[in-house]
Image: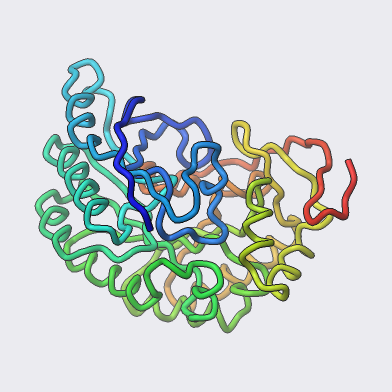
């Protein structure tokens, strides 16, 4: 991976207006992410760097401090969600340094932060988090314990074992931890045996809350799936979305959602098995506008959200076999 340092030209903190991040301030330490998960929608952003390249905002901590110390703005920021289009704990030392410094800037000013990671959290973050009780909320992204899944969908992220260790260490540091099971891959990670295996490992580490969301497709994801998945998995996923229309989900994002009945059956398996392990699952509202769901970011905690109607858009091709 090539890491290129760039200056931040726009404000560090931005306020979002969609889904589970609605009205939450967010920041990204990098543009692009070394993990390059197959299903990552951010890889399709127009400003995303080319494959093998990550842009690091090296001046971000200083710029962040300047923004926060403006009296007018300082009063309205209660918490910040980290790296919503990348990952806070990519492995490059410079990325970790900037992440640490940016988190320290917030915590030293009494501003809370949340993050979702599929990476390994270095030990040096433990004292930083522990010294600011009540200001850090963590989510670990973990969909499956099976190496085959990681090899196909998240080959550069931390292993399942490392993410389970993250949970143990975060809890030992006094940090509340939730797990995000997203994206659930139909017919790959949503069978009963896989769910039981995952729930058992999470319950053994004290996890009591998880958020759920099935894979959904955006136009830019199609090339990624076709280029990076083997034919068997590509065919399974393609069959689920083949006849689905493009819909406007959230503020303006065009997506293909899995058929509602398939999602309902899958979520029912997760819900049905959860009580056996003392786990309470929540369905994420971002990708389920047609189902009762919840806002599931740690920045907002879990708040009920009524189902919204999908806004129909014109039919577009998934794998080239539909017509407008």
Asked which quadrant contains residue 272, the reply is: bottom right
In this view, 107 is above or below 185:
above
In this view, 254 is above or below 198:
above
Residue drawn at (17%, 63%) of the image:
173
Give the percent coordinates (x, y) of residue 2: 36, 54
What color scheme is it? rainbow
Left or right placement of residue 15 versus residue 162 in this view: right
Asked which quadrant contains residue 263, the reply is: bottom right
* Nearer to me, 143 or 242: 242
Q: Quadrant of the C terminus?
A: top right
Give the percent coordinates (x, y) of residue 286: 56, 45
Q: Total of numbered circles in the picture?
A: 0
* Nearer to me, 267 or 138: 138
Give the percent coordinates (x, y) of residue 96: 23, 54
In this view, 164 is above or below 97:
below
Residue drawn at (50%, 69%) of the image:
143
Residue placed furthest toward the right:
323
Q: Quadrant of the N terminus?
A: bottom left
* Nearer to me, 186 or 316: 316
Residue drawn at (72%, 73%) of the image:
231
Asked which quadrant contains residue 25, the reply is: top left
Left or right placement of residue 92 versus residue 126 in this view: right
């Amino acid at each position: 991976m090539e890491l290129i340092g760039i200056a931040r030209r726009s404000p560090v903190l931005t306020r979002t207006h969609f889904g589970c991040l609605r009205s939450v301030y967010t920041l990204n330490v990098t543009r692009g992410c070394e993990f390059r998960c197959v299903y990552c929608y951010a890889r399709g952003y127009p400003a995303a760097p080319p494959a093998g390249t990550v842009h690091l905002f090296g001046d971000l901590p200083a710029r962040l401090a300047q923004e926060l110390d403006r009296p007018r703005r300082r009063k309205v920021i209660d918490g910040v969600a980290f790296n919503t289009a990348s990952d806070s704990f990519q492995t490059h030392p410079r990325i970790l340094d900037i992440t640490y410094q940016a988190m320290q800037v917030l915590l030293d000013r009494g501003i809370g932060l949340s993050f979702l990671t599929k990476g390994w959290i270095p030990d040096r973050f433990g004292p930083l988090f522990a010294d600011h009780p009540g200001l850090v909320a963590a989510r670990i992204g973990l969909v499956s314990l099976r190496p085959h899944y990681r090899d196909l969908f998240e080959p550069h992220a931390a292993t399942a074992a490392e993410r389970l260790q993250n949970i143990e260490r975060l809890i030992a540091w006094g940090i509340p931890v939730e797990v995000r099971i997203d994206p659930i891959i139909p017919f790959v990670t949503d069978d009963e045996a896989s769910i039981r295996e995952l729930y058992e490992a999470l319950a053994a580490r004290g996890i009591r809350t998880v958020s759920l969301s099935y894979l959904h497709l955006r136009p830019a994801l199609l090339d990624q799936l076709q280029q990076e998945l083997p034919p068997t998995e590509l065919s399974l996923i393609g069959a689920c979305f083949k006849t689905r229309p493009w819909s406007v989900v959230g503020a303006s994002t065009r997506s293909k959602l899995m058929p509602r009945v398939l999602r309902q059956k899958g979520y029912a398996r997760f819900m049905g098995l959860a009580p056996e392990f003392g786990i309470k699952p929540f369905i994420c509202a971002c990708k389920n506008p047609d189902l009762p769901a919840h806002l599931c970011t740690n920045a907002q905690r879990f708040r009920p959200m009524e189902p919204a109607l999908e806004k129909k858009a014109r039919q577009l091709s998934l794998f080239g076999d539909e017509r407008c």
